[in-house]
Image (cartoon, helix red, strand yellow):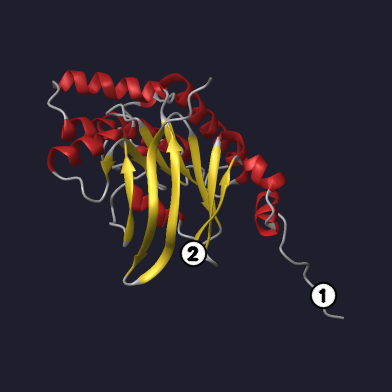
Amino acid sequence: MTAPPTPLIRVEGLTAGYDERILLSNVSFTVNRGEVFVILGGSGCGKSTLLKHMIGLYAPAAGRIIIDGFDVATSVGEDRRKLLRTFGVMYQSGALFGSMSLTENVRLPLEEFTSLPDEAMSIIALSKLKLVGLDQAADLLPSQISGGMQKRAAIARAMALDPKILFLDEPSAGLDPITSAELDQTILDLRKLLGITFVVVTHELPSIYTIADRCIMLDARVKTMVADGPPTVLRDESKDPWIRAFFRREANQPVEVAK
C-alpha cells in the first residue's frame, strides 16, 4: 500500500491583509514534498499577499503557516535561522544586484549564512549557475544578459543554500513564449534532479498546465480559496462555471454590440 504524501508546508486558517483591510480569509491547504504547487487567480485576488505571508514577510491576522515543522510567524533565534535555510525565493523582477556579477549575486546567501572559505563559495555559486545553464555567463552583469537568463540566475541564487523549497513569484512575467517554455523546463529539471518542492505564483495558463502537479485558486470576490487540485481536473471537472472558464480562458459573458 502506497504511503500518503508528506506535507512539507501547512497553511491553516490563514487570514491576511494590510491596515485592517482583509484580502484573504480562512485559507487552508498543504504542499507535499516534491510537488510543483501553483497559486493562481485573477488580478487582486491575493496571490502575492499569500506568498509574502508564506515566506515570513508579513504575519497572519489569524491562522498559521508551518514549513518543515517551523511556524513561520513565531520562529525566532536558531529556529528562525533554520527556517530561512529551508527555502529560497525568486522575486518577480529577479532582484539581482546590478553592480555584481552573476557569481557574486549567487554567493550572497552563502556569505550571509555560512563561514565557508571564499574559494568554496565561488565554486558552489558556479555549480548553481551550471544547474540553470548559466555557467558560461558567470562573470557577466545582469544588464549583460536577457530577461530569461536573469530569472534563471535568480533561481540559482535561491538554490545557493540547497533549500528544500523554492518560492517563485511570477517567473514567466515579461518573457516571450519560447523563453517562458525554457524556464518551465528548468523548473521541471530541477525538481527531477534535486527533488526540490516548488511553490509558484502565476496566472500563465500554458506554464500552469506544463509544470503544476496541483494548484489552488484564489478569488477576489469572496476573498478566499475556491479550488484545489490538478489544473486539468479543475478545467474539466469543476462544478463552478467560473473556474472552468478561467482554466479554459473563456470570457464570462458575451459582449452585446449596440445596434
Which residue type does callout 1 highlight? Val
Name which quarter of the figure residue 195 lies in.
Answer: top left
Mark 2 Cα shell of 10 Å, populated few (<14), some (14-19), many (≥20): some
Drawn side of residue 160 relative to residue 212, left or right:
left
Circle number at residue 57: none
Q: Quadrant of the C terminus?
A: bottom right
Q: Position of residue 32 (x, y in %)?
A: 44, 34
Q: Residue furthest front?
A: 1
Which residue type does callout 2 highlight? Lys
Relative to 108, residue 116 above or below: above
Residue at the image position 67 percent from the left and 57 percent from the top: 240
Circle number at residue 223: 2
Q: Residue furthest bottom?
A: 259
Relative to 202, residue 140 above or below: above
Q: Position of residue 204 (x, y in %)?
A: 58, 46
Residue 167 in sight here: yes
Circle number at residue 257: 1
- Mark 1 or 2, nearer chain start: 2
Drawn side of residue 201 relative to residue 255, left or right:
left
